[in-house]
Amino acid sequence: MKNLYRYLIAFALLVVAIGSYSYGNTTGLFIFVILGFAFEAAFWLKLFPIKNKAKNSQ
């Protein structure tokens, strides 16, 4: 179930990113292109999370 939510959120972020790119491209508002970039970055970070490789010293 945890993976299902992760993939659904990643898919939603991808759809919003594409929508933002598309709207920013058709209207000429650069803020939507920046929002699209932010949502795409969130998509990739959500799909492939950064794992902490530091070992606990406790």
Image (tube, rainbow, N blue to C red):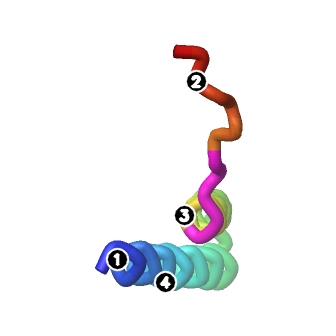
Principal secondary structure, stretch drawn in magenta = loop
**Circles 4 and 1 in contact, beta carbons < 8 Å:** no
| x, y percent for residue 24 | 62, 74
Residue at the (41%, 77%) spot, across then down: 3
- Among all residues in the image, which is located at the extreme top? 58
Q: Which mark is residue 5?
A: 1
Image quadrant in which the N terminus is located? bottom left
Name which quarter of the figure residue 14 lies in. bottom right
**Disc 3 and disc 2 in contact, CB within 8 angstroms:** no
- Sequence-wise, which precedes: disc 2 or disc 1? 1
Amino acid type for the residue under numbered disc 3: Lys
Q: Amino acid at mark 1?
A: Tyr
Residue 44 quadrant: bottom right
Extent of the magenta region: 47-51
Q: Which mark is residue 11?
A: 4
Which numbered dot is residue 55?
A: none
The amino acid type found where label 4 is placed reads: Phe
